[in-house]
Amino acid sequence: MPRFIKQESIDEVAAKTDIVSVIGEYVPLTQKGNDWWGCCPFHHEKTPSFSVSVDKKFFYCFGCHASGTVFNFLMNIDRMSYPEAVETLARRAGVVLEYSEGGNSELKEDPSAKLKAEYINLYNRVTVSFHYMLTNSESGKFALDYITKRGITKETIEKFKLGYSPADRKWLRSFLESKNFSKEFLDNSGLFSKKYPEYSFFSDRLMFPIFNKNGEVVAMGGRFLRGDSENSPKYLNSGELIQYKKRETLYAFNFARQSIRENKKVIFCEGYMDCIAYHQCGIEYAVAPLGTALTEEQINIVKPFIDTVYLSFDSDSAGQNATKRAILMCRKAGLTVKIIQIKGGKDPAEIMLTFGKEVLTNEVNNAILDNDYLLLKLLELYPKESPEGKTKASLEFFSYIDSLQSDIQKNACLEQLCRTYEISLEAVKKDYENKNSAHLLKNNQHTSDTKQKLVPKLKNTAELNAVIMAVSDNENLFQKMRSEISVDDLEDPWAKKLYIIMEECTRSGNFSLSNILTRCNSEELKNKIIEFTAENKAGSSERDIESVVLLLKKNVFQRQSVEINNKISRLERSSLPEDKLQITELIAQKMDLSTKIEMLKKGINDGTN
């Protein structure tokens, strides 16, 4: 039977979590008044429009309207499920979660969360075994000699928990089965061949554990060291696993995170060894994609912390193509980009070994801007002496211009292109404008479609606005409403839903904006609540609530009056004496309602004057 996190536990986690401290690990925040402000991590901006309210315990971006509680923030920034976010913050706050059978589906325990934890535990145990094999076994001595000759120190080996997977491909299976792991569990772990499950996926390789941001091992990479090199790939990497998504993970980010924040920059490098070399040389803001080209998800991991991206990919054609692609992606994300050019085609690990960390540090310090790098590469491909070369270089450079966020920067780079290829600025700008105009209609249609998708589905009814107005940390305002209006008096289904949530919070003894948002399972409704609260920081006064209560009561009486009219119309067609008597009673009720409506109208007008 499914288990659910108890609401009381969620309330305790929310109460004990400092939202500024949590969000501050992702976004540099500055206090202004009672709130904290920074640049939104969910869209590109230069001027801070992202606010965090300590009192209300929610965040809100006035630019892209991202909003929610601290749980929502973790779900969006780290792509967690709701239960994962609760469990993460519970560990942070020292709260022991309680679970129950059945309950609100929103609070249902993620069925994959337990399995993820079990596989993370497995990978951490295997890492310990492989690390021991490398550092303490005779079979792993040759691998230790190899990595030591590459200049990797004992301290670095320990830090990155490097290991060795035994040549005996049946050893790991036998070892884990002796620890009572089930056959099905091991078959799906990613540690064994899918075709021949008794054989290890990694064997006789130098092992690189892959950590998540919390420092837990979630996957592995293995480097080939000896044997048939023609039929053995240089690197084998874990595939997609329940606890591991390549596109959303960066190698060494758990080690680099603090340095990235302090330096406001990151190095994206080619692979494990290059990344480790940077760290050993004291350049600890280096990370690496994992067997794939750099992804938007990986850029978004570091984007909240940085101003500048350094790219350190190989000098071969594949590496250079990866560099060009990464430049465009990072520029579109609003980041400054520099290119580290390792002399002589050597990689960072070789520079460290041959010349020492000073030279590698110097290479980083001498990194060039991406526009300079791209123009140098274009000159190698397209000679500036020929008209065809000028045209091809310009068209290729235009894609870089498109990625820039600033018109001033675009203009400056177009001028640089003209100087480099000795072309008229007027001619280049005309070609650039012609290229863009060809796609203008299509782009405008796409923008229109995008905006259409963002239109909220909620109707902006008076009832819903009235109930939202009562959402405040001052419970007395809602008490005033509930003493006059019941949920059955409301017609708008969204207003009913919110009223019920507020009633639940009142009965639980925790009526707060944070708790209301936690219990609300509609992102549209959450956004509307937060937008209203963020834009009405003074809150709703008791007089405001009295006015809306009068308005709601008037609407209720008017609906009742319409119902009475309908009943009278039906009864007038009857000749029965009892129906005539009922008509008289209904007319009296209608007159009473009319009097009440007029009084309410007067009260509403007095309240607004």
Image (tube, grey):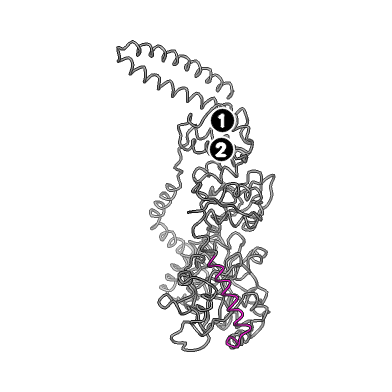
Tell me if residue 362 is in the magenta stretch. no
| Marks 1 and 2, how far apart at CA | 10 Å
Q: How many marks?
A: 2
- Report helix, strand or loop for mark 1: helix
Q: Quadrant of residue 480?
A: top right
Compared with residue 184, is residue 11 higher up or lower down, i.e. above or below? Answer: above
Q: Quadrant of residue 392?
A: bottom left
Q: Position of residue 393 (x, y in %)?
A: 45, 71
Residue 156, numbered label:
none
Q: Position of residue 404 (x, y in %)?
A: 52, 61
Q: Position of residue 567 (x, y in %)?
A: 37, 19
Crowding near pointer 2: few (<14 within 10 Å), some, many (20+)? many
- Residue nearest the observer in this picture, 247 or 214: 214
Q: Amino acid at mark 1?
A: Arg
Name the residue located 63 percent from the left edge and 46 percent from the top edge: 57
Q: Taking 199 as reference, is 371 left or right?
A: right
The quarter of the image holding the C terminus is top right
Name the residue located 69 percent from the left edge and 45 percent from the top edge: 33
Q: Amino acid at mark 2?
A: Met
- Residue nearest the observer in this picture, 222 or 234: 222
Location of mark 2 (residue) = 502
Residue 482, numbered label:
1
- Residue nearest the observer in this picture, 605 or 418: 605
By secondary structure, the bulk of the magenta-drawn segment is best described as helix
Q: Are marks 1 and 2 in contact (CB under 8 Å)?
A: yes
Q: Position of residue 572 (x, y in %)?
A: 32, 14
Span of residues in magenta: 118-141
